[in-house]
Structures are given as structure tokens and as C-alpha cells.
Amino acid sequence: MLDAVVVGAGPNGLTAAVELARRGFSVAVFEAQGTVGGGARTEELTLPGFRHDPCSAAHPLGINSPAFRHLPLERYGLEWLHPGLPMAHPFLDGSAAVLSRSVGETAASFGARDAGPYRRLVERFLPRWDTLARDFMSLPLTALPRDPVTLARFGLVGLPPSTWLMRRFSDDRAKTLFAGLVAHVMAPLGGFATGAIGLVFALAAHARGWPVARGGSQSISDALAAYLQDLGGTVHTDYEVKRLDDLPPARAYVFDTSPTALARIAGLGNHYANYRYGPGVFKIDYALDGPVPWTAEAPRRAGTVQIGADSGEIGAALDAAYGTDRAPERPFLITVQPSVVDPGRAPAGKHVFWAYGHVPNGWTGDLTDAIERQLERFAPGFRDRVLARATAGPPELAVRNANYVGGDISSGAVSGLQLLLRPKISLFPYSTPHPAVFICSSATPPGPGVHGMSGHNAAKAVWRRLRQR
């Protein structure tokens, strides 16, 4: 009998398996798709030689993850590549605000009135970032806070809505960039604890940047899988699990799946019936004949580029995705251009690029024209560079990754108490009513992102249970 079986080979499932194997437990992973990776995969979606990331591409939380930083993933081929700028946010006048490794460069891009307030906001936390990140991404029951005073101070700033935090800025440049940071997890700007979301992304950039993985996000998943196999674990792909009886006997079953799928497979009935899914996304992967023709200079050097004319436009786009059944006319876009720093992702002189906009959950329309009209506002002539495109709306994303219910790449709404307490209000979020069944997906704290911390935290709950037995 195995000690643990993990269902789902995304970054969280693989991290949970690695943490258990490192402690001497026998582990096997079962994945429905033909390759490991979940939200961290790389494929030729458009033309031969163009290597795209179907979901996540830039990894501020990956390089800052306490779980990943203590694993020898570089030994297994993971290499982080840093663009000239982690992120840029262009404006219609041809200028741009930036999120740089340098606090000073970032502050200066906001203008004289907001440079000081921004410095004061981030510089109080940056010296304690590593400890703060560990405390923020763990739970008191999985790891006691190492610096409870700094964590409490961070909570005072971050727990109110992001709109409160943005009041300290005078001009809209800083507000717009910060609103875009919050929108990365599709959270409404006026929601509980959304200030913390934006602040975490900013601190992560200043601490270690927003890199891409050389060769694509698949490198992260492949490194985790290779390390697991060296530890004695096994990985089985093309293995769809429909019920617990499909799996070999084990002392514990750990699910890197949506709560909905877990309840169906494990026979938990309506245990997660109140779990809410958030907006979906409409994503386009592009093969380009050259770099994106940004009007502003800064986006040409950035790995990630946010697209929204001002904070009001971003807020309206989020409100439309959350509160209506129609896609926004001017969607807020997150775009990533990996070949700016990793030219091997495309043939010589060519580029890969992706963009997505938020849409209502389960939306079945086509956002291609709206996305490209937005891009043309900040990069005139963009359409002339397009060699091929691969589009995926909520239905297609849900087929690619069953955790993306209705196209929700956050695996659950990041709003209200569910931002912090997910998948249920509980002191034991990784446990289920079945004593041998656990959940480790992005539907558990600390939530969405390629960081493995949900798997790391869940593994602690599993090995404590196994040792008790």
C-alpha cells in the first residue's frame, strides 16, 4: 500500500508529492492530461517553433515562493530569466508607469507627487520580505508566524479594499498601475483585502522580479516531476480519475483539483456546494513577425505589460466581468512577451506573445476583436505583426484544465472571505470529511498562482495525519 496518492500534476500537486517523498513517504501522482503541468505547461499552439504557455507565463510568486526556494529545482533544469523590467503599464499619451526591481525607478515613474507615498508604502515591508512572504503564504496551523508584528502591520494596510490604499496617491498613474496589480487575480477593486494583493505583487517585483522560466513554464513542472522521481515517487499521465476506486490503495489521497471535482470523485455530496467560482478569461496566444510595436519605450523592455487606460476603465472592466453576463467593451488586459528575454521561444526574429481579458464565468462569446482594439490603442500596427493566433474562451480553458471551472483560472472567486478562507471557512482547509482525503489545489490558501504553497501546506497536514496513524 502506498502512503499517499496525489491526483493532479499541477504545481501544487507536484509540490505536495515532493514534500511527502522528501520525508520518506511512498508517493504516486496521477494526471488526466498527457503531460504534467496543469497551469504551468508549454505547447506549440500556433505555428511550429513557437512555444507558448497556455496559462501562466510570468512568475513573481514562483521565484519568491518559500516552497520552491528550498527545493533544488535548478538542478533539474529550472532557470529564471529576468526581462529589463518586470512590468510596465503604458498610457494613451505615450508614457508608461513601471514596476521595476528598483523602488526608486518605480516611484519616479508615478510622478513627483506620488513618489514619496509609494516609497513609504513599500520600504517599510521590503527589508522583511522573505519572512513576510512565508508568513503570508502559510497558515498559523501549518507554520507559526516568524514575524507576527510585521504581519500585523501588513494586515492593517492590506486588509481594507485596494481603493482605500490607493487614496494615498494623488495622480492616476500610480492608481492605475496598482489597480492592474489587483486585477491579476480578478478581484474587484473594492473587495476585502484587495490592498494586500496589489502590495504583494509590488513587493515581489522589488525583491526578486517577475521572471519567466527558460523554455517556458513547463520547465517548472518538469523540474518538480524529475525531482519527485529521483526521490522515488512515480508519475502516471493519461490517467483520468472518476472515483476513488480508480486509484491504488493508499493511506492518504491528495487532490490538486477543484472542490467540485473532489466532491464528485470522493463522494462528498454537497460539502463544497457554497464554493463560488469567479470570472473567466478569454486568452489569445500569438505568433508575431516581430516585437509588439508599443508606443511607449518601457513596455518594449518589460516581460509583463498591463493594458488599461486608467483606473476607472480597469474597475469598469472588472465590474462587468463580475456583475453582468456581457464582456466589457474595453477589457483590462494582462499581456506577457516571454521572447523579449527568452528568444529561443520563437524562430529567429519572431516572437511569442499572449493576452487575456476578463469575461463572465462560462461566457461563450469571442473577445478577439475587443482585445486587439485595446492593443492597437497602445501598440498601433499590432495586427500587422500577427502571423497566427490561438484563442481560448472559458469553455476551451475548462477543457484544457478541469480546475478552470467556467474559465476561472483562479480556481475560485478571489473575493469576500473566500479570498483568505477557501474552500470553506475552516481552520483545516486542506482536510475533508473523509479522513484519508485532502485537497491541495489553488482553491486552498494561499490561493492562485504558480508557487506550490498550497501543495506545501497541504503536505504538512497529510504527513501529520500519517504520523498520527
Image (spheres, grey):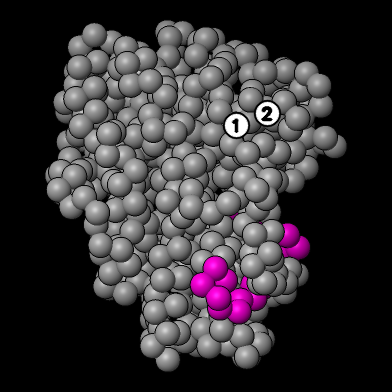
Pick the residue in front: 306 or 448: 448
Question: Does label 2 or label 1 sit earlier along the sequence?
Answer: 1
* Residue at position x 54%, y 68% in the image: 22
Instruction: Kindly identify the amino acid type of the residue bearing the numbered disc 1.
Output: Leu
Q: Tag on residue 81? A: 1
Instruction: Kindly identify the amino acid type of the residue bearing the numbered disc 2.
Output: Asp
Q: Main secondary structure of the magenta part?
A: loop
Q: Residues within 10 Å of mark 1 (few under 14, many from 20)?
A: some
Q: Quadrant of the N terminus?
A: bottom right
* Residue at position x 70%, y 69% in the image: 235
- In the rendered view, does 281 fall on the left or right side of 414? right
The answer to whether mark 2 and mark 1 are in CB contact below 8 A is yes
Task: Determine whether 142 is above or below 389 in the image.
Answer: below
Q: Quadrant of the C terminus?
A: bottom left
* Residue at position x 54%, y 34% in the image: 211
Q: Element type at marker 2? A: loop
Residue 293 placement: quadrant: top right
Task: Determine whether 57 is above or below 38 in the image.
Answer: above
- In the rendered view, does 269 fall on the left or right side of 224? left
* Residue at position x 53%, y 54% in the image: 71
Residue 341 in sight from this viewpoint: yes
Q: Is residue 18 magenta?
A: no
Pick the residue in front: 202 or 94: 202
Residue at mark 2 to residue at mark 1: CA–CA distance: 7 Å
Q: Is residue 33 magenta?
A: yes
Which residue range is magenta in the image? 20-40
Q: Tag on residue 342? A: 2
Q: Element type at marker 1? A: strand
- In the rendered view, does 361 fall on the left or right side of 79? left
Residue 121: give x, y in percent of width and height.
21, 29
